[in-house]
Amino acid sequence: MAEPLRISAKNLGALALPDFCPRCFWLKLKVRNRLPFQIFPGIFSSIDAYTKRVVHAWIDRNGGAPVWLKGLGEVTGYINPPHHSRFYIELPEYEILLTGAPDGILTLPDGSIAIIDYKTAKYTGTQDRLMGMYEIQLNAYALIAKHLGIGNVTKLALVYAEPVTDEETAAQPEIHTDDGFSMPFSVSIHPVKLDPDMLEPLYNQARQIYELPEAPDRTPGCKDCERLDELMLLARKL
Ligand code: SF4
């Protein structure tokens, strides 16, 4: 496959966002996601990684998942998710290299696996504006996991961990330690339908947008693009 379009599962999922902008998509693909002013607080990734360690440590000690993961059903163990540099599938018919980095892979009693993604966020169910993107992302992980022979994926889920920050909780003496304090999280499980076929139409769509010779039109009324225009004007040499 010559010069494939390298796209992450998450970026492919952007095609399913209700406010999807082809111009943004095209720009991100062309500059390989290296856009300016994209500062994402690292604390969320740290908490997601911590949640994974909490789950793995519990399974190591007890052989099953903690009670707060009961929404996933019975769990027998876990598989350390591969590094993103090894988690990909080539799709020569679309000239696409689909990549990803799953947060968690859990083993189930029938020998199959569940792929989960941790979200440090309040759970709002289907109200979550990003839900369409997450569904694509998880189904892409399922496709890649199957291709790599990691296991037969039978379950996908989002695991939301919402910080509990009310006054009553903050007043509990147990949260204090000698060198700091702890914050509890309330967990909600959102099952995601396993349907890798939903990815098929997106490959062509991604490819078509990527191959456009010029950036597509901007979304009318987008404040960010208006601000960019203002910045460009300001920065223009007179
Ligand atoms: S219109 Fe908005 S979403 Fe589209 S490229 Fe401009 S900033 Fe991005």
Image (cartoon, rainbow, N blue to C red):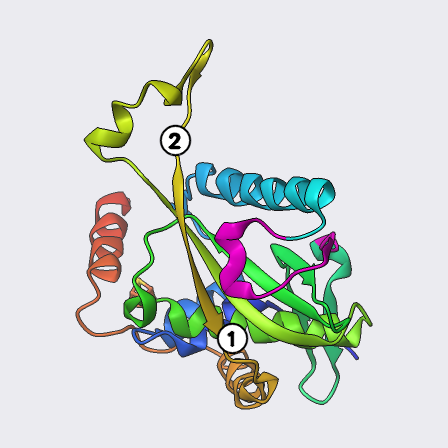
Left or right of residue 131, residue 116 in this image: right
For the residue carrying disc 2, how many other residues have a C-alpha within 10 Å: few (<14), some (14-19), or many (20+)? few
Return the residue nearer the eye: 77 or 201.
Answer: 77
Identified at 20% across, 52% down, the residue is 230
Left or right of residue 131, residue 238 in this image: left
Quarter of the rendering occupied by the N terminus = bottom right
Q: From the viewer's perspective, is residue 184 above or below residue 11?
A: above
Left or right of residue 12, residue 230 in this image: left
Ligand 1 located in image quadrant = bottom left
Q: Quadrant of residue 95?
A: bottom right
Could you say whether the residue bearing mark 1 is in a helix, strand or loop?
helix
Residue 112 seen in the current view: yes
Whether residue 189 appears in magenta in the rendering, the answer is: no
Residue 7: x and y in percent read 60, 69
- Residue at far right of view: 149
Which circle's residue, 1 or 2, is located before the other in the chain? 1
Residue 163: x and y in percent read 35, 41
**Residue that badge 2 annotates:** 183
Quarter of the rendering occupied by the C terminus = top left
Identified at 44% across, 71% down, the residue is 133
- Residue at far top of view: 178
Return the residue nearer the eye: 11 or 127.
Answer: 127
Instruction: Give the magenta part as a residue range.
Output: 65-83
| Residue type beneath disc 1 | Ile
| Residue type beneath disc 2 | Met
Disc 1/disc 2 C-alpha distance (Å): 31 Å
Identified at 71% across, 55% down, the residue is 81
**Residue that badge 1 annotates:** 136
